[in-house]
Amino acid sequence: MLWLLVCSGLSLVGLHMNGHVHDRVDEHRAAVLLGLPESELRRYSRASGLGHVENDDKGQKVVFTYEELRQICLLVAQSSK
């Protein structure tokens, strides 16, 4: 039940942070938002095909949209039953 509450609130998290609209989050922030270790997030990401690699000035990183995080959250909730 807790995971379903977390999942339903995810769509609100990214709307306004510091006055800016954010449409994606990196792997570390995604893990923090979901309350998962990064290794566990990677496992769900690979299994579901959610998340994608982006290049920035520091190299490559995996990023997620808030919709992708919501879907991963639902997968976590289903697997914890």
Image: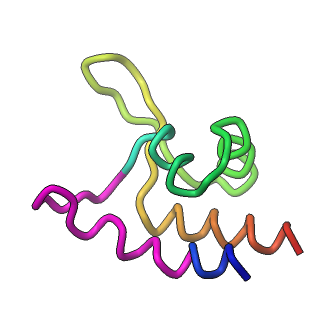
- Report the side of 74 relative to 31 (left or right): right
What segment carries the magenta color?
7-24
| Residue most extreme to the left | 19
What is the tally of numbered marks visible in this picture? Answer: 0
Q: Quadrant of residue 71?
A: bottom right
Q: Quadrant of the N terminus?
A: bottom right
**Which residue is found at the position 63% from the left and 63% from the top?**
72
**Which residue is found at the position 85% from the left and 67% from the top?**
79
- The foreground one among 46 and 26 is 26
Q: Quadrant of residue 66?
A: bottom left
| Residue most extreme to the right | 81
Give residue 69's position: percent from left, percent from top: 53, 62
Colour mode of the rendering: rainbow
| Residue most extreme to the top | 58
Q: Is residue 13 magenta?
A: yes
Give residue 56's position: percent from left, percent from top: 28, 26
Q: Quadrant of residue 13?
A: bottom left
Q: Quadrant of the C terminus?
A: bottom right
- Report the side of 3 relative to 30 (left or right): right
**Which residue is found at the position 48% from the left and 37% from the top?**
62
Give residue 75's position: percent from left, percent from top: 73, 68
- Report the side of 5 relative to 20 (left or right): right
Q: Is residue 67 magenta?
A: no
| Looking at the image, residue 59 lies above or below residue 45 | above
**Which residue is found at the position 75% from the left and 72% from the top?**
77
